[in-house]
Amino acid sequence: MGSDDVLRTHLQELRRGTVVVASLVALRRPDYGYALLQRLTGHGFPVDANTLYPLLRRLEEQGLLTSEWNTEESRPRKFYRTSEAGEQALDRMLDDLAAVQTSLATLIEGAPR
Amino acid sequence: MTTSLTDRYLTATLRSVPAPRREEIATELRASIADMIEGRTADGQDAAGAEREVLNELGDPAQLAARYADRRLQLIGPAYYLVWQRLLIVLLSIVPAIVGVVVGVVTATTSDNPGNAIGAGVSTAFNVAVQIAFWVTAVFAVMERLGTPLNLPEWNVDQLPDEPVERDIKLIDACASIVFLVLTIAFLPWQQFQTVIGDGDRLPILDPALWASWIPVFLAVLVASIGLEIAKYRAHRWTWPLVGVNALLNLAFAVPAIWLLRDDRLLNPAFVDRFAWLRDGGLDIVARISVVVIIVVTVWDVIDSVIKARRAAR
């Protein structure tokens, strides 16, 4: 395994959990799978379609998202929206993300270079 | 309407998705695929090419289905792997050997061909090993699918192995070697008086003339080897003097034995005469095989002792 591969693996690990957070934030405004994918990519969260679609269903099953079928347009689309429980979970996750950021900042400051 | 690539992709994906949710996932996934294709054709790509690209991007339908069903793509996961591995090692190191030996011994009592008995033992042991490996793995794979809790106690330091390699020479190995040597010593007088041939006749296997020459030497070497085993056990490991003595004893046994075998002086001529097969060239084959076996065993034993002494010296 080259050092590029090592770095890529670490970056993937770092990104993995943030897709859930980003989806919950983005879906405060209801959206369907492909549109969400586009929005996330546009905001610097590149995510594979074959990861995001199953993830949305899983978050729905966990009660963090609610869904509604929209049949008014050319094809029926399932719109997801962050639920009340999702909002609470998101708060906790954002707090945690901020805590990690703070901890890292103090660690970087305190560590001699 | 002809079956499109998308239809085939959906069929392949939904095959392994739980039935109650199949319909809904199908509708949603179809819409998502259509959206993705549309996104590409809007950029000026042709529809067929866009469809291919989108489906390629979504990847193996079986993998996508596993993600929808939240199913891990592994036979035995980390929760079960170590238990599976340990159980398999314990079972494989004990059961096939026992069953193989039992079958071999039972076959030996009913058949007069020792080759048959060994063959039966080895093939049974192999079959038992394959069966164990298959069934243990199958049971663990099912447990993995069902998520059966193992309820094993948490690991703690009390479970550490006792002494980390304090002693290279195990008591059980030393005992086994000494038992083998004693049996070999006992064999020498036993074959002189107790070898029964045919109708109650008794004939020594080894040439009785050797009692006045080489058999005492072999006896002395064997007794000295017992001493070596004891010294080795007390030293806890192979040391260079022990390696030297071991090499000398090996040579003191192998050289005369090979020399006697080559000159046809080891076996009792009267004993050889009783077996037509031995008389008509068989003796030569037996001698050759014995010489090769003695050389291989001797060389290996010396190399093994050197390797272990070097490891212990580090």
Image (cartoon, coloured by chain):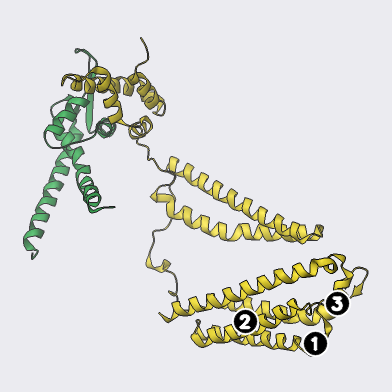
Chain colours: A green, B yellow
User: How many numbered badges does the structure rendering display?
Assistant: 3
Determine the residue positioned at 75% across, 67% down.
B285
The quadrant of the picture occupied by the N terminus of chain B is: top left
For marks 1 and 2 on the same chain, the one whose residue lies earlier in the sequence: 1
Question: According to the image, label 2 marks what residue?
Answer: B250
For discs 3 and 1, the disc positioned in front in the rendered view: 3
Determine whether the residue tagged by mark 2 lies in a helix, strand or loop: helix
Type of the residue with mark 3: Pro
The residue at the far bottom in this view is: B212
The residue at the far left in this view is: A109
Q: Position of residue B204 (x, y in %)?
A: 84, 78
Question: According to the image, label 1 marks what residue?
Answer: B211
Q: CA distance from mark 3 to mark 1?
A: 15 Å
Type of the residue with mark 2: Asn
> Does residue B227 appear anywhere in the picture?
yes
Q: Chain of mark 1?
A: B
Nearer the observer, A92 or B227: B227
Badge 3 density bin: few <14, some 14–19, many ≥20, Cα 10 Å: some
Question: According to the image, label 3 marks what residue?
Answer: B269
Type of the residue with mark 1: Trp
Q: CA distance from mark 3 to mark 2?
A: 27 Å
Q: Is residue B153 left or right of residue A77?
A: right
Q: Position of residue B236 (x, y in %)?
A: 50, 82
Q: CA distance from mark 1 to mark 2?
A: 20 Å
Badge 1 density bin: few <14, some 14–19, many ≥20, Cα 10 Å: some
